[in-house]
Each structure stands twice: as C-alpha cells, then as structure tokens.
Amino acid sequence: MSAALVIALLTGYFGILILISVLTSRNATSDTFFTGNRSSKWYLVAFGMIGTSLSGVTFISVPGKVYVDGMAYFQVVLGYILGYIVIAQVLMPLYYRLNLVSIYEFLNERFGVVSYKTGASFFILSRTVGSAMRLYLATFVLQKFLFDGLGVPYIVTAIITVLLIWVYTFKGGVKTIIYTDTFQTVFLVGAVVLSVFIISNALDLNLPGLFKSIQAKTNQLGYSMTKIFYTEDYKSPVYFPKHFFGGMFLAIAMTGLDQDMMQKNLTCKNIGEAQKNMYSFTTIMIIVNFFFLLLGGALYVYSDSMNVALPMMDGKVATDEVYPTLAFEHLGLFVGVLFLLGILASSYASSDSALTALTTGFCIDFLNFNKREESEKKRLKFIVHIGFSLIFLLIALVTKWYMDNYGKDLIDVILKAAAYTYGPLLGLFFFGILTKRKLKEILVPFVCVAAPLICFILSSNSKEWLNGYVFGYEILILNGLLTFALLALISKKTLQD
C-alpha cells in the first residue's frame, strides 16, 4: 500500500469525522457536551458502543492471541453477558432514578464527598491509562507501516493523532461522539467480517471449511485453535471459571461503573430505551467478538498454507503484529485498506469517547460545573479537554517504550491494569447498593489504595505462595471483595439497619 493512498484515506476519514462534528455541534452548549440533551436514539448508542468497547486492542490482540490460547477469550465474552444484565437491571435504573450526569455523584449522595472524589479519581486514572494505551495501537500501526518509511518520528505521529481527536470532539462532546462512534463501528465490524470472508476465499474454503482448518491447528497450549472451554487446570490463567466470572465483573466495572460507557447510555430518553440499547449492544458484541477469534484462526491457517513467515520478537511470535503484517504485506490491497480503516475506527472510537468522558468527569466531579456560568464553563471545558489530550500523548509515548522493551500482548496488560484500578469502584458502588451502613470517610482513600496494592502483591507472588496458582482476570473480583470487606471495617450502622 503506497504512502499516497494511506494519506488519502486518512485525510478522507478524518474529513468525514470533522464534518460530522460540525453538523452535530451546531448550537451546542456545555449541557450538550455532557448529556447530548438526553435525546439520543437507543439503536445508535447501542451500535456505536461496539466501537468504544472493542478498541484497537481487540482489533489486533484478540486475533493474535488465538495462536497462544485458542479461542479461550470467548469464555470472557460469555461472562460479559451476565455482567451486562446486572448493568441493565441494577445500575442503569439507579442512574436514571437519580438523574445523574456523572455516575460517581451516586457516591456523594450515598456516602459523602470523600467517597465521591475517590471514586471519580479512580475512574480518571483507569480510563486515562487504558484509553491512551489503546490509542498507542493506532499510532503504532501508522508508524510501522507508513511513517517509518517516510522518516517521520513516532512523536510526530502521536501528536497528529491526538490533535485530530481533539479537533472533532472539543465542541459537540457526547452528542458528536454518538454519531462518530456509529460511523466508525461500521468500518470496524465491516473490516473484521470482510477479512474473514476474503481469507476464506483465498484458501478456497467456505466458512465451515475454514473453521475445520482452524480446528486442525494447535495453539501454544497444545490444544486445537478452536478450543473455547478450558476446565483442565485450575491453576491456569485461562481456566473457565476465572475467565467467565472475570469477564462478568470486567463488564460490570469497565461498562457499568465507567463514565465513558454510561455517559452514552444516559443520553437516551428514558430507562426503557437505555435497556434496549444495552441488550442490543450485548447481542452484537458476542457476534463481533466471535468473528475476531475466527479471524485470528484464519490468519494462522493462511500463513501456514501460504508459507508466510510470522513476525517474531525475541524468538517468539509477535502476536500483536500478525494481523497488520499479513493485511499490509500479503493479503492484497483491499484487505490492507480494510485493516487500516478498521484499526482507525476501533482505536479512535474508543479514544475520542474516553476523552469526552474524562472531560465530563473532571468538570462535573472536580470543578463544580453545575454552579458556574455558561461562559466560564466553556473556558474551563476547553482547558480540561486540552489537558487530557496532552496526558493521552504522554501515556502513549510511555506505552511505546514499554512495548518496545517488553513486547507483551497489550490486551492482557490493559485488562490486568483495569482489574487493579476498577476493583475499588466495584467495592464502593456495591457497598453502597447492598448495605445501608455509613463510612468513616476520611479512611476511604486509604482503603481504595490498599486493596489493589494487596492484590498486586498477592498476584505477583501467587506461584510461590499458592502452589503454582496464577491469577487471571479474577483478580478484579478479589480486589472488589477486599475493598468491600475493608469498607465494612470502617463503617458503622445507621438507624435504617
């Protein structure tokens, strides 16, 4: 794929995003930025949330990991279903009943200002780190397959990327994001589905035949690449209960307790439409994730059948580079274009909405926006939006250094980081929902730091301390439970108990 074609695609793609921004931000106020005037269509929110949830990490890392542990990731996806039911039936009715803009305002009403600020701080930490890491993937692909050849340094690529996101989100906010995410999700879903069919056709196979070919190949664990359920070894990080229940609580934390995801849901007209959105989103999410895993198996079948050398790093297959390498160098121009549009869509759909949600969260939770004049709101929102854009840039640069030196699967890094930072949110919210006890608030920040720290120490030493046991995503559950237990220790009964 020529540099001229890539630049033309990038220009056209961002031109459309900026046009959408202009059209959707007419007469926009600060309330439009934060709530979309609560007039979003549930089906647009549902479809657009796919792009936000999956991100570039899913687009690259999930297909790549099929080489390592087959389709074990689908155990996590199945766990998502239970998590989304809890969100639709427990959390969203609570948010709508309280008419929240920031979901962390619940903690203020339930416990007080210290718990409120603590919960909001953990969201900002987790979403900033996770979203900036996801953004790194888009810049990595552009750098490796375009800008390296043009002699452009990575920092320039990263600056341009962040600047483009800022341009089309700074005015319309969540109202713009609803439409840009829908537009980008079309490219994301289209890219993965069409790639599967094109590879199948190149191998002269139909879909059942392709699945059988994938089934015949083995992953690094020695099982078929189509193996989903791992029930043999409870010590393994892909053991079914770990993945399934870890997925359930990851969904609750990273969607239901995440301002980014819930801000979109709260733009629907009422709770009924918001629940329609959640259940539609769940159905589409399951199907799309299965196609990502099918694509991963197809890539390895193709490379084996066509004698294509896989990208390597330190003597191991560089799984995060498999899809981009085959797409750009071996599968033809059309697949290369699909991949480029897909990685752009998945990465930017996640990052742009996160930037908007972080701006919303900081303005509402820390700057008391509800008590300010409109002119002051616009000035502060502008400054905060720029501030988080610069933080995204810094974290993307740090992530590049980390991946260059350690080269791990980025999806594992992000989900493990989320397990530590979202655990205190799980504990706080469910302590507030399931009990009527009051907290000694001055101690809440210490509890929310202590719980993930204890979990990190335990996870780092579990092989030695727990007879070879390795923690997976279930560390999030332990983190939430430990936070809940420590909160109970610093709580007292109320007259309602």
Image (spheres, rainbow, N blue to C red):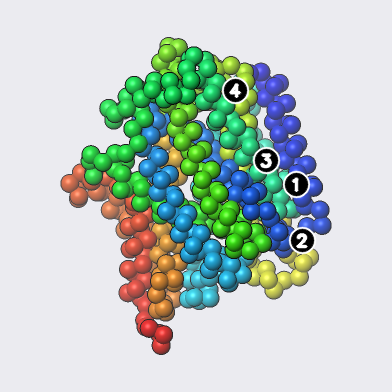
User: Residue 125: x and y, percent?
Assistant: 51, 55
Q: Position of residue 160 (x, y in %)?
A: 67, 37
**What residue is at 43 percent from the left and 44 percent from the top?**
77
Under mark 1, the amino acid is: Ser
Circle 2: element type: loop
Instruction: Please tell me whether mark 4 or mark 3 is closer to you in this view.
Output: 3
Disc 3 versus disc 2: nearer the observer = 3
> Residue 398, image x and y in percent?
51, 41
Q: Residue furthest left?
A: 467
Q: CA distance from mark 4 to mark 2?
A: 40 Å
Residue 21 is marked as 1
Q: Residue at x 75, y 37 (%)?
A: 16
Residue under label 2, please give it: 29
Instruction: Tell which of 487 and 495 is nearer to you.
Output: 495
Which of 156/253 is in front? 253
Q: Is residue 487 above or below residue 80?
A: below
Identity, as a three-letter code, of the amino acid under mark 3: Phe
Q: Residue lying at the far bottom in this picture: please name it.
A: 495
Circle nearer the N terminus (3, 1): 1
Residue ID for mark 3: 183
Q: CA distance from mark 2 to mark 1?
A: 14 Å
